[in-house]
Image (spheres, rainbow, N blue to C red):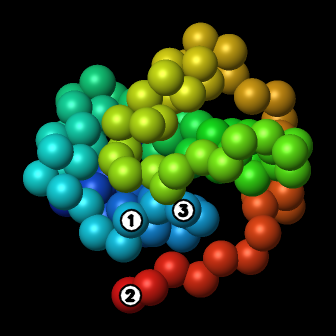
């Protein structure tokens, strides 16, 4: 577990910005969400797994399904983080999820 809240914020932000359909900056509320996750000691690998799982679920929907709007906040991932905490993903599944996401280049 990361012990420095700023390092945790930087690492999490980098993962978040690398996802498709996410904003290119954090709001004040998003920063509060991150600090809450830090205080709850949610490990970065759990956050990454939740980010990837939610993103793959969004991008691999049926083509005829109603389009989803863009992700506007880190709070979108809170239920998936809880899901991953309760039911950890099998070994190797995060790599599989990464392979399912289309290549994405975040804006600096």
Residue farthest to the bottom, as pictured: 108
**Quarter of the image containing the N terminus?**
top left
Q: Position of residue 48 (x, y in %)?
A: 56, 47
Residue at image coords 63%, 40%: 54
Residue 46: quadrant of the picture = top right
Task: Indicate which label's residue lies in the foreground, 2 or 3.
Answer: 3
Ranked by sequence position, the earlier of labels 2 and 1 is 1
Question: Which of these two is toward me, 14 or 23?
Answer: 23
Give yes or no for contact between labels 2 and 3 (Cβ–Cβ under 8 Å): no
Residue at image coords 34%, 47%: 73
Residue farthest to the top, as pictured: 86
The reply to whether residue 48 is visible in this rendering is yes
102 versus 16 height, above or below: below
- Distance, label 2 to label 1, CA atoms, is 11 Å
Ranked by sequence position, the earlier of labels 2 and 3 is 3
Q: Which residue is mark 2?
A: 108
Disc 3 element = loop
**Mark 2, other Cα within 10 Å: few <14 / some 14–19 / many ≥20:** few
Disc 1 element = loop
**Mark 1, other Cα within 10 Å: few <14 / some 14–19 / many ≥20:** some
- Distance, label 1 to label 3, CA atoms, is 7 Å
- In the visual, does 60 lie left or right of 27? right
Q: Which residue is mark 3?
A: 21
Residue at image coords 59%, 19%: 83
**Quarter of the image containing the C terminus?**
bottom left
- Distance, label 2 to label 3, CA atoms, is 15 Å
Q: Position of residue 91 (x, y in %)?
A: 83, 35
Q: Which residue is mark 1?
A: 23
């Amino acid at each position: 577990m990361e012990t420095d809240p700023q390092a945790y914020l930087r690492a999490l932000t980098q993962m978040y910005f690398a996802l498709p359909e996410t904003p290119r900056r954090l709001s004040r509320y998003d920063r509060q969400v991150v600090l809450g996750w830090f205080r709850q000691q949610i490990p970065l690998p759990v956050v990454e797994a939740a980010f990837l799982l939610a993103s793959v679920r969004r991008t691999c929907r049926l083509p005829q399904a109603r389009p989803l709007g863009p992700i506007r906040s880190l709070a979108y991932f809170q239920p998936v983080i809880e899901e991953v905490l309760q039911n950890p993903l099998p070994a190797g599944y995060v790599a599989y999820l990464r392979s399912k996401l289309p290549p994405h280049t975040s804006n600096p």
